Image (tube, rainbow, N blue to C red):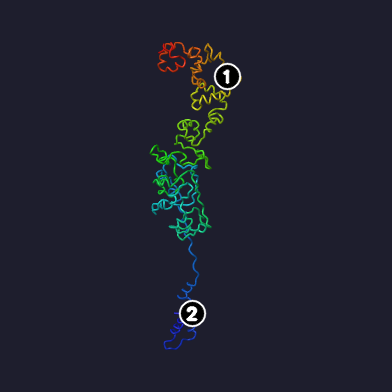
Amino acid sequence: MNASKRSAESARKTRRPNGRPLPGWLAFVACLSALILGLVGPDASAQTADDAPAAESAAPPAPPPGGYKSGLHPMPNDAETPLAFMPPGSAASPVPSEEIYPPQTITIRFNHKKHTKDLKQTCKSCHAAAFTSDKVADRLMPKAEQCDACHDVDHSDLNAVKAGTDANGQCVFCHIGDKAGEKGAVAPMVLPNANLVFTHKKHLDRNIQCGQCHGQVGELELATRDQLPRMAGCFACHNMSGAAQGQAKGACTTCHTARNDGRMITSFTTGNLVPPQWMHNAAHTPDFIDRHKAVAANDSAFCGSCHTTNECTDCHDGRVRPRKVHPNDWLSIHAQSARQDNPRCSSCHQAQTFCADCHRRVGVARDTASGNRLAGRRFHPPAAEFTTAPRGPNHHAWEAMRNLNACVSCHTERDCATCHATKGLSGGHGVNPHPLGFRDKCGVAFARNPRPCLVCHQSSDPLVRACQ
């Protein structure tokens, strides 16, 4: 009913029962009331609502007080990750090598456990690229558009990402930072390439599943670089021997990057790559200079994976001499140390190549030309003390009995036989080297080892027959 009809109806009802019209003032009041009712009545209210401007769209959902908590750390509340969830080999190497795996910057939150356990997603659902990857430089993280299938967001144009109305479609739902997505910007993730030679495809084709290298990622929330493989875990396959090894070769350069000469690259921006302690006890700790000879003696090819022969000789021939090994005045005092404990010297030095070569260069070797021997450079005392009778404290006989190893570091048996061998066929001077009373016990010495006797004596020598 419009306003004019309501006004007429009101006027009709105001007539007196006898049909006579109401007074003029009363009719005026009735018409005015009807007009006011028409302006503020239900129809007018509806028309006003229809003509009102549309309300502004609701603000996007805000994060809960304190922000989102899950997916920020491997375990809730940043608790310690159980060893059972870590990659194989983590007991020997608790943290991954920074030289092999440079530090990362992860700027999203992601709950692997929710996606794999609750949403029944597999590794391949997000990381399908890993199943065809044949080099470390391949990008294996899922593209942003892949998230759009479940999240209320459109990443089709990364320069103009469109957030939806649901909470899971807002930038701050996944990206770290209170202002993530402001002006279209989010903090970038930094995932440097590993310094390795590795192909995911070959491992997956051999039924080596993700957890055998990365641990139980499905039990974690955020996966960090702590889930990257450990070499101790790789050795479960790559350190086999014989037929068990198969195609999992154990050479260092199977996995490690190498130079053109075949040696490993060990210097990186994050530090120098050195062996771990569990590998041949070869950790380059401060005491390694004392232990390295045993490591090198056990497997010199292992050392050669990183070091050249020149690096060894530079130190061992004295050109680069660690002060911890020998003091600065070592050249002056090494003769006394060599006399006292020559076997210890020979644990590093070769007498005939290292010691003798040096002595020849400076003119103190027996076979050096006399013209090269400077005054005062005689190694042994004068002959009157060292070789001719009577025997004194400096006589060579006492030196030989005290430490024969010191003698043979320069001399051979033939040098001794020149004087001590019997005359005649043996070519010696017949100088008797044996102590008093030796003939009474020579039989025991000959029976134990006749070779030293035959250096000076012929087998037909009557003296030898007497000892047989």
Question: Where's residue 80, x and y in %?
Answer: 43, 45
Question: Where's residue 422, x and y in %?
Answer: 48, 12
Disc 2 and disc 1 in contact, CB within 8 angstroms: no
Q: Label 1, on which residue?
A: 378
Graded by Cα atoms within 10 Å as few (under 14), some (14 to 19) or many (20 or more), the crowding at tag 2 reads some
Closer mark to the observer between disc 2 and disc 1: 1
Compared with residue 254, is residue 354 higher up or lower down, i.e. above or below?
above
Residue in view at x 45 percent, y 76 percent: 43
Answer with mark 2 or mark 1, whichever residue precedes in sequence. Answer: 2
Label 2: element kind: helix
Q: Which mark is residue 35?
A: 2
Amino acid of disc 2: Leu
Question: Where's residue 318, x and y in %?
Answer: 55, 29
Instruction: Work out whether residue 70 can be spotted.
Output: no
Given residues 61 and 37, the one toward you in this image is: 61
Residue in view at x 44 percent, y 12 percent: 461
